[in-house]
Image (cartoon, rainbow, N blue to C red):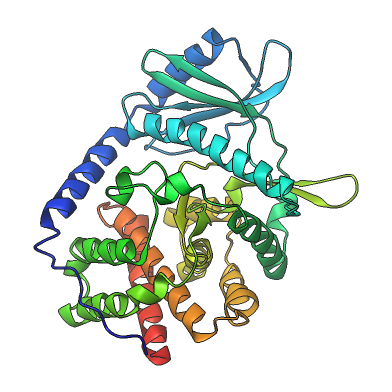
Amino acid sequence: MPKKEELPNPAAQQADNTFHQASVETIESKFEIDPQVLNRKAVETISAAGYEIDEATAPYKLFGSRNRFFIRKCRDSENNEVVVKIAAPDSSSVGDVEKETMTISIVQNALERARSAGKQLTIHFPEKVGEIRAGEMRGLVTRFIQDDKVAKQHLSADDRVHMLRRIITDIQQLDVPDEILRQQGPHWEQQIPVKTGEVHVNQIVYALEGMLSEILTPEESGEIRDIFAQYKALIDTFPLRFSHCDMHAENIMYELTPESSSRITLIDLEALCVDNEFSDWAMLATLSEVAPKFGGYDEEVADFVEEIKRIGLDKDSAKLGAAIEREVIIPHPRGKDAKIVYLLMCIESCLDKFTDVSKKTDRISQILSEVYVELLRERVRKIRELS
C-alpha cells in the first residue's frame, strides 16, 4: 500500500481557499441575466457582424434561468453554414468563450502534429472561422457540424463506451505543449488547468469545508481526506493528458457518413484541462448513475428527466457506468492502481457535482444533492474494500 502522506494544513490554505471561494461566488453571481436581454443583444450582435440566423433550426442549448450563451446556426455572407456562440455580457461566460477560442487553436495544432507524426486519429474539433468583438459582447464562430441525435441516443451502452473510448483515446494521444505543463500559480488561474495529485487533494479539502461539512459526519470527511492524502503520489504516477472535463452527449457531435462509418466532433472546449487518464471516465460514470436514482419521479421532475434523456443519459444509463468498469478499468494494465485512481476521480466528480447544486433550494437540486452524497458514500466504500 502506498505510504500515507500528510494532508496540507487547512489553516495554511485558508487564504487561497478564501480567494477561490470569493472568485466562485463572483462568477456565480454574474451568471444571472434576463434571457430576453441576452437574446436581444445576441441577435443584434450577430446581425451587425454580417451573419443571418437560421430560424428553422432550434437553439443548440437551453440554459434555463442561468443564461450563459446564445448559440445558433447561422449563415455568413457567402451562405456558408456556421455556428455562432455569443457569451452573456459582463459575466464569466465572456472569459469562457475567449478561453474556448484559444483552446480550439491549441488542440487543432496538437491534432495536426499528431497526424503528421503518423498517429491514426479519427476525432475532430470545431473549426474556428471567426470571432466577434463588439463592445461588451464576445462571440466565437465555427463551421457548422451535423449531429444525428436520434442515432446517438439509440447507441447501446457498449456502443457508447466504444465511441467514448475512441474519443478519449484520441485526446490522450495528443501531446500537451511544454508551455502548458510549465504554467505556474493556482490551477484555476492557469490558461489550461494542470491537475496534479496535489491539486486534487486541495480540491477535496476545499469541497469538504463547504456544504458537505453539514451532511457528512466528521469521520466520513476525515476518511475522504485520508484516502486522497494516502494516494496523492499514486495519482502522479499516471501521465498527464488532455481531458475534456464536460463530456456528455450534447458535446459530442455524431454524424453517420454515407459509408456507414461515424464522424465524431468534440465541442465546448472551454473546460479543457490536463489531468490523469481517468478524469473523463469518472465524470461520465457519475452522470450515468444519476438518472436511475430518480425512480418514481413525478411531474415535478419530469422536465429534468427529459433533459437527462436529451444529453443521452436515460433511465438505463447505469449500464454505461458498468460498461466503463468492465471494458476500461478492469482490463487496465496497472490493475489495482488504476481502479484506485479511477475511484478517486469518481469521488471527486461526486463532490464537484454536489457543490454545483448544494446552494440551490429547488426540489430537483435537493434530490441531486442526496444522489451525489449516496454515490460518494458508495465509492468511498469501494476504495475501502480495495485498500
Placement of the N terminus among the 4 image quadrants: bottom left
Q: Quadrant of residue 38?
A: top left
Residue at the image position 49 percent from the left and 50 percent from the top: 303
Query: Which residue extends farthest right?
Result: 259
Residue at the image position 42 percent from the left and 54 percent from the top: 300
Could you say which is closer to the camera, residue 293 or residue 181? 181
Q: Position of residue 182 (x, y in %)?
A: 39, 49
Q: Position of residue 226 (x, y in %)?
A: 25, 80
Q: Is residue 374 visible?
A: no
Q: On the rendered structure, is 118 left or right of 336?
A: right
Q: Is residue 310 visible?
A: yes
Could you say which is closer to the camera, residue 340 or residue 274? 274
Q: On the rendered structure, is 184 left or right of 98?
A: left
Q: Position of residue 12 (x, y in %)?
A: 11, 61
Q: Position of residue 99 (x, y in %)?
A: 44, 35
Q: Quadrant of residue 83?
A: top right
Placement of the C terminus among the 4 image quadrants: bottom left
Residue at the image position 38 percent from the left and 32 percent from the top: 95
Q: On the rendered structure, is 49 left or right of 253?
A: left
Relative vertical location of residue 311 with respect to residue 27 in this rendering, above or below: below
The mark tally for this picture is 0
Could you say which is closer to the camera, residue 18 or residue 72? 18
Relative vertical location of residue 72 with respect to residue 16 in this rendering, above or below: above
Residue at the image position 68 percent from the left and 30 percent from the top: 144
Q: On the rendered structure, is 199 left or right of 121?
A: left
Could you say which is closer to the camera, residue 313 or residue 138? 138
Relative vertical location of residue 227 with respect to residue 128 in this rendering, above or below: below
